[in-house]
């Protein structure tokens, strides 16, 4: 027992050793270092690493060590209990304890769920074959790297952000890569047709082969996947298949605690679930009908959650505008807000240099920026996000705005807002929730 | 004279200034030339800039394809010979130019009149000088300018009638201005417009267009009634004073009547009359405002009548003075290269015809006057003229009813055109011949004061271009007239011309134009010929003091009675009056830095800078009544044609009147030549058309969009929009104003690519803000900016042409390709892009170069410091490994250099 003079610390258990969970812990430590005894349960046998940079590891541009955010020593130094390589299997919300698959039970006063998301797996024959992998964690990356050493061909199903990063990484590792994509243009949730076409052209120039407008009928093979067959009958022989058709929030554990959930674990503005002792952040949650896949809104969640845990009852979450970018070296893509003019009130400004590989689009509503898609030159992306967020009237520099802040400020009577992403909070970023990306 | 310096004369106006061209092609005024004594105007000073040969015609062409001289000349000779055989000599015609050298003129005139046997040779001098010629002949019996330039300086009163001397004869204006400074010369300007010439005027009479005759009949009445007339002249030296005075009294019985006709205040008119009466030393200078009129010849004689009545001519500081427009209109008149002259101041009398035929040994000779310019093109349209050769002039732009002239050129079975550059006229030619230009050919010109000067070559003609006299001689030889056209040099032609002027020229009826003293010049003497005034009969010493002024003693007239003749000049208004349907009167004229149809001056950047585009001047009150503001488009229409021009509000034109410069052509603007609207009512005596008084109507045309196009190609655009072109150092700039909505979607792409005139290999950069009607295009070829187009809803939203012009044709760095479209600020950036380098932090758009600069300047040592300063790495953190690497590299570099 602890002596009467010292108040017992509350126990905080974090399920999920990913970016969202650990960022919350960091924020919390910076606010109230001594408030909690902290334990972290992580399914992967690794310290916390940047899932965003898995693509870079796959592409051979970084090692796993490069992308580790918090090494084991960091946990030890802060006396955080790390239970890595173990899966939390159930929550007893009444008794406030968690069952772990190694047989342990861990009690808590406050529980933070940061269980992230799971890859979507299409309901087609052959997805269970051993050489068919999703692209989700370092184990997937290692499997792909191994395949690239011994195999020649790969098919990536899904031409979204993840699929393209996987395709590029495998291409870099010497594989002949074919991407099968359901839609006519790539990354259609972040890019319009013009930008998608530039992206496809640039990737084709690097050797990637595309089947757009193509649906996969089945993955054929007995022991191993041998070919991908499309609904139109075309057959693409392969040695390896990557599934990258999307993600969904991981709510399995939350269901065991009977927490309210829809697509994701439902949280309020305080990041608390339907159980006031249980919080949730990151890709596993659903807030006001939105689920999350991009980093900026999730960082904001971790701040609010940490503040709440630290006792600040005023902290409330307002989703900031989110933006997406693609991690393929030499290909710069930035996308935020509305993707296209939604109605007659919306106006588009475009700048297109097909040969130079540049495309910029801004969506304006009443001389306010509500969306941008940038390809090839993305430096001003955050500035546009800031203009969106601050609802700046851009009429005075509208003719220059697409050329970037430096030029616009030469003609604008007043300085425009400084760019900011981290501080962005608010603005109707209706598309942010739809952007599915591995952020936390 | 410094080594390598060539003395020659200016190819522009009729002042005929002497020039010195240095070995490096710099042009300066010749201080020894009597016309200018070293002075130059803006056009003359820029002559060195006109020597670029880009766009020149350098090879003969048949059907648009280069061919040999033999083929081209054979084709013309065959067409002429066949046409003569089938339809007679009058089915053949030459239309030539006051830009011709005298030698060119002589060969053309001899070929047409003495060998083809028709007088169907007319010249653009018909549009310029014909009324002065006719007026001189009526008054003096021969086409003689009695005075010289020095008279303008010696006068106490200079009256400038229908002459924007300041812009059109700038060096003479400088001489006048200097004299005015020195001796307080009074200056009166008679002109419907308040031109820059009025700056130095004591009185400006802004008369109703075409009412000049009334000014001078009123003056004659005033002189007669106030006893200012010189009885010796009215009774003994001249005939028909009474008839002229009576006609003047009928037209303008009183000052008030004259003022009413002219639309000026009687008091102003009275001040002028009193000045004229009081100053014996009066020179009346007149130019196109007098000549280009359906009453042009009467205007000339109304002026001369007043000088005859006061005996004020041929004496220092006195006389009527016709300023010719072209550099060698006078030389053409001396040759006789007009349809109503035969040759060398001889006319179509049996005696003259026989004399010229003897001299030329002609197989056949024209026995009657030929077709004057307006009639000539009408005859081509009507099928009477079937083979036409146009040399050194651009009638498709400069003739009145230019649209009909184009139809005539299209209808004529055979058209040949000689010129230096492609023009609106060469488009209609079956055969195009490349003519040697100024600086490339040798010969003589005569200026407004009867001064013959040498024009000398100082460089070779490009390609196969040759002088006009050579082409004409070659065609003559191929038509079988080799013996009479075996010319080897301009000197040989000039000697023959001089010999003809002296041929059988003595005794009764002697011709004043006699330069027999020059008929025996050796080639060397011809080359060295100093400026010399005529007459210069055989035996005259090269000292020619008597030749500068004629008739001063009341004698020497070439009339039958040996006297000068007064000519009754009853006032009549312009041929066609305004009415409710055509309420405005359109005046045409010139601007300071352009010449004719801009084939030469339109290529010089600094000359185009004075007025870059055509404009329709309209009085602000008229503009307001018609819903027009400065710069708006107006549709202007006459009975002969219509066009669209931007308007310029100007209090310098009278209400109810409009003014447009005659220079611009299809090569420079969608508006085309204003002469397409101008009527062709001609003076009954001179045949000179009325170019300055055409009834028109005007309507505002709402601009739907504005555009600016720069490109290497000078291909003219076509569409429902106004455009105007100015040359740039490396290409051309077009301003565009549309009166129809922009095409949309698919149509717009075709339209845009046509405007850009981009080759297939071009790479396009496109900016579009359709909601605002803003579109911008850059076309890059081989990494160089080949074209760019800006379209916006307002003119003020367009970028500066000059900033873009600096980029045109220049290499555009990859990171600056889009900056070209960002307007002036972007253009400056594109010229010297500030590179941020490869993007490292995508979240905050921080580039490698920016990081290097920050690390070096702010001595940053950690990722945290970079994040605090530049925010890089503070969002997703993906770039932190790169930031670490950049930091460690820069630290090891600074350690190495420490």
Image (spheres, grey):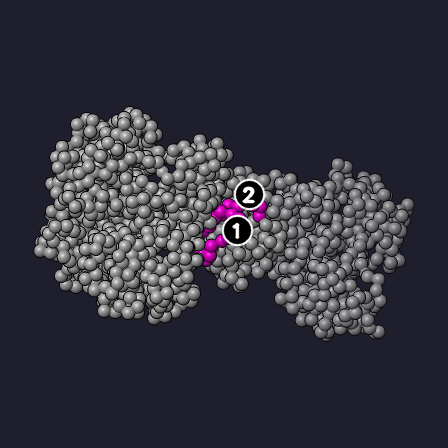
| Mark 2 neighbour class, 10 Å CA radius: few under 14, some 14 to 19, many 20 or more | some
The disc numbered 1 marks a residue on which chain? B
Q: Name the residue under label 1.
A: B719
Residue under the image location 30 percent in, 41 percent down: B296
Q: Where is residue A5 in the image (x, y as percent from the top left)?
A: 81, 39
Q: Nearer the viewer, mark 2 or mark 1?
A: 1
Above-or-below relation of B530 to B259: below
Most foreground residue, B16 or A184: B16
**Rounded to the nearest whole Å, what is the CA distance between mark 2 and mark 1?**
13 Å
Q: In percent of the image, x 54 and y 50: which residue is there? A: B776
Residue B738, magenta (yes or no): yes
Label annotation for residue B704? 2
Identify the mark nearer the N-term, 2 or 1.
Answer: 2
**Could you classify mark 1 by the number of other residues whose Cα lies within 10 Å: few (under 14), some (14-19), or many (20 or more)?**
few
The residue segment tinted magenta is: B713-742
Q: Is residue B298 something one can see in this rendering? A: yes
Q: Where residue B440 sits: x, y (%)?
A: 28, 61
Total count of labels? 2
SS class of the residue under badge 1?
loop
**In the rendering, at what x and y percent does residue B441 appear?**
26, 61
- How far across and down, in percent of the image, does residue A213 sit? 74, 62
Residue A80 lies in the magenta-colored region:
no
Q: Residue at x 70, y 46 (%)?
A: A342
């Amino acid at each position: 027992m602890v002596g009467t003079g010292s108040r017992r610390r509350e126990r905080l258990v974090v399920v999920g050793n990913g970016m969202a969970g650990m960022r919350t812990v960091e924020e919390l430590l910076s606010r109230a270092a001594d408030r909690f005894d902290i334990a972290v349960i992580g399914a992967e046998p690794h310290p916390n690493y940047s899932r965003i940079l898995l693509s870079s590891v796959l592409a051979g541009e970084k090692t796993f060590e490069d992308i580790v955010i918090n090494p084991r020593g960091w946990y030890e130094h802060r006396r955080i209990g790390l239970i890595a390589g173990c899966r939390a299997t159930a929550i007893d919300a009444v008794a406030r304890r968690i069952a772990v698959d190694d047989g342990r039970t861990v009690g808590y006063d406050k529980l933070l769920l940061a269980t992230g998301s799971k890859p979507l797996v299409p309901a087609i024959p052959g997805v269970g074959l051993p050489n068919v992998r999703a692209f989700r964690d370092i184990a997937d990356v290692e499997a792909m790297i191994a395949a690239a050493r011994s195999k020649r061909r790969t098919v990536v199903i899904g031409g979204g952000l993840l699929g393209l990063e996987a395709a590029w990484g495998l291409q870099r590792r010497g594989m002949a890569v074919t991407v099968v994509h359901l839609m006519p243009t790539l990354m259609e949730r972040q890019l319009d047709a013009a930008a998608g076409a530039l992206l496809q052209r640039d990737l084709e120039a690097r050797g990637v082969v595309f089947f757009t407008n193509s649906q996969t009928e089945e993955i054929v093979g007995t022991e191993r996947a041998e070919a991908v067959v499309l609904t139109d009958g075309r057959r693409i022989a392969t040695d390896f298949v990557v599934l990258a058709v999307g993600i969904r929030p991981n709510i399995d554990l939350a269901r065991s605690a009977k927490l309210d959930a829809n697509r994701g674990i439902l949280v309020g503005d305080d990041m608390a679930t339907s159980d006031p002792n249980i919080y949730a952040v990151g890709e596993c949650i659903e807030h006001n009908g939105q689920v999350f896949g991009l980093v900026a809104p999730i960082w904001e969640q971790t701040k609010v959650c940490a503040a709440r845990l630290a006792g600040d009852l005023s902290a409330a979450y307002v989703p900031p505008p989110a933006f997406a970018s693609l991690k393929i070296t030499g290909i710069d893509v930035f996308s935020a807000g509305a993707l296209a003019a939604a109605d007659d009130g919306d106006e588009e400004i475009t700048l297109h240099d097909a040969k130079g590989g540049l495309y910029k689009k801004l969506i304006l509503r009443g001389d306010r920026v509500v969306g941008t898609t940038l390809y090839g030159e993305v430096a001003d992306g955050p500035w546009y996000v800031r203009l969106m967020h601050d609802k700046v009237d851009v009429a005075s520099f509208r003719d220059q705005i697409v050329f970037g802040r430096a030029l616009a400020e030469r003609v604008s009577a007043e300085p425009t807002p400084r760019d900011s992403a981290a501080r962005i909070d608010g603005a109707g970023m209706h598309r942010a929730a739809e952007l599915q990306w591995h952020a936390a | 004279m410094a080594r390598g310096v060539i003395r020659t004369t200016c190819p522009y106006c009729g002042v005929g200034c002497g020039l010195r061209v240095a070995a490096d092609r710099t042009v300066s005024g010749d201080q020894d030339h009597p016309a200018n004594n070293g002075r130059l105007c803006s056009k003359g000073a820029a002559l060195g800039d006109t020597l670029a040969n880009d766009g020149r015609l350098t090879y003969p062409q048949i059907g648009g394809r280069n061919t040999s001289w033999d083929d081209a000349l054979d084709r013309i000779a065959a067409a002429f010979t066949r046409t003569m055989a089938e339809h007679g000599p009058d089915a053949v015609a030459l239309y030539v130019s006051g830009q011709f050298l005298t030698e060119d003129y002589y060969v053309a005139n001899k070929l047409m009149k003495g060998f083809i046997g028709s007088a169907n040779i007319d010249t653009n001098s018909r549009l310029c000088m014909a009324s002065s010629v006719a007026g001189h002949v009526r008054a003096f019996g021969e086409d003689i300018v009695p005075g010289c330039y020095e008279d303008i300086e010696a006068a106490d009163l200079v009256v400038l009638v229908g002459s924007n001397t300041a812009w059109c004869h700038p060096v003479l204006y400088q001489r006048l201005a200097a004299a005015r400074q020195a001796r307080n010369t009074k200056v009166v300007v008679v002109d419907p417009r308040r031109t820059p010439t009025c700056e130095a005027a004591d009185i400006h009479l802004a008369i109703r267009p075409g009412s000049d005759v009334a000014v001078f009949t009123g003056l004659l009445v005033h002189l007669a009634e106030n006893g200012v007339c010189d009885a010796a002249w009215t009774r003994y030296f001249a005939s028909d004073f009474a008839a002229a005075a009576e006609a003047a009294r009928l037209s303008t019985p009183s000052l008030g009547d004259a003022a009413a006709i002219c639309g000026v205040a009687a008091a102003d008119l009275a001040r002028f009359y009193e000045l004229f009466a009081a100053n014996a030393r009066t020179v009346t200078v007149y130019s196109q405002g007098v000549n280009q009129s359906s009453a042009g010849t009467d205007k000339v004689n109304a002026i001369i009548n007043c000088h005859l009545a006061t005996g004020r001519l041929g004496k220092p500081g006195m006389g009527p003075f016709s300023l010719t427009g072209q550099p060698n209109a006078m030389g053409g008149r001396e040759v006789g290269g007009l349809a109503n002259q035969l040759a060398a101041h001889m006319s179509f009398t049996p005696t003259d015809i026989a004399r010229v035929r003897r001299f030329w040994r002609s197989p056949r000779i024209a026995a009657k006057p030929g077709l004057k310019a307006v009639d000539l093109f009408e005859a081509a349209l009507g099928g009477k003229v079937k083979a036409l050769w146009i040399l050194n002039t651009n009638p498709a732009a400069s003739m009145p009813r230019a649209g009909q002239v184009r139809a005539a050129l299209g209808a004529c079975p055979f058209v040949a055109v000689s010129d230096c550059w492609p023009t609106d006229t060469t488009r209609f030619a079956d055969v195009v011949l490349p003519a040697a230009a100024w600086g490339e050919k040798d010969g003589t010109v005569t200026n407004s004061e009867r001064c013959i000067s040498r024009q000398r070559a100082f460089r070779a003609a490009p390609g196969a271009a040759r002088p006009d006299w050579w082409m004409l001689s070659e065609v003559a030889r191929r038509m079988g007239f080799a013996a009479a056209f075996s010319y080897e040099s301009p000197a040989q032609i000039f000697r023959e011309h001089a010999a003809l002027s002296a041929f059988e020229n003595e005794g009764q009826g002697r011709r004043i134009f006699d330069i027999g003293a020059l008929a025996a010049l050796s080639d060397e003497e011809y080359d060295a010929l100093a400026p010399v005034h005529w007459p210069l009969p055989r035996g005259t010493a090269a000292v020619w003091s008597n030749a500068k002024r004629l008739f001063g003693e009341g004698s020497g007239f070439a009339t039958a009675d040996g006297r000068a003749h007064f000519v009754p000049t009853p006032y009549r208004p312009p041929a066609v009056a305004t009415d409710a349907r055509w309420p405005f009167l359109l005046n045409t004229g010139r601007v300071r830095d352009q010449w004719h149809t801009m084939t030469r001056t339109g290529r010089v950047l600094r000359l185009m800078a004075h007025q870059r585009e055509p404009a329709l001047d309209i009085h602000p009150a008229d503009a307001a009544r018609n819903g027009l503001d400065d710069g708006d488009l107006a549709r202007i229409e006459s009975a002969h044609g219509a066009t669209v021009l931007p308007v310029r509000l100007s209090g310098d034109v009278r209400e109810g009147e409009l003014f447009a410069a005659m220079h611009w052509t299809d090569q420079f603007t969608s508006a085309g030549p204003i002469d397409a609207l101008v009527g062709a009512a001609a003076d009954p005596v001179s045949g000179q058309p009325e170019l300055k008084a055409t009834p028109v109507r005007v309507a505002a045309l709402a601009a739907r969009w504005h555009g600016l196009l720069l490109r290497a190609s000078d291909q003219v655009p076509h569409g429902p929009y106004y455009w105007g072109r100015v040359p740039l150092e490396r290409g051309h700039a077009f301003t565009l104003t549309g009166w129809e909505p922009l095409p949309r979607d698919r149509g717009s792409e075709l339209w845009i690519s046509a405007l850009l005139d981009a080759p297939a290999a071009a790479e396009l950069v496109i900016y579009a803000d359709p909601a605002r009607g803003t579109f911008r295009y850059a076309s890059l070829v081989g990494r160089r900016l080949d074209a760019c187009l800006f379209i916006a809803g307002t003119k003020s939203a367009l970028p500066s042409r000059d900033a873009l012009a600096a980029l045109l044709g220049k290499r555009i760095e990859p990171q600056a390709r889009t900056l070209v479209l960002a307007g002036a600020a972007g253009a400056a950036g594109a010229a010297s892009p500030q590179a941020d380098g490869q993007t490292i932090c995508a979240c905050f758009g921080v580039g490698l170069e920016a990081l290097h600069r920050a690390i070096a300047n702010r001595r940053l040592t950690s990722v945290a410091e970079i994040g605090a300063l530049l925010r890089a790495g503070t969002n997703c953190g993906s770039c932190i490994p790169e930031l670490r690497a950049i930091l460690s590299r820069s630290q090891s570099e600074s350690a190495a250099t420490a």
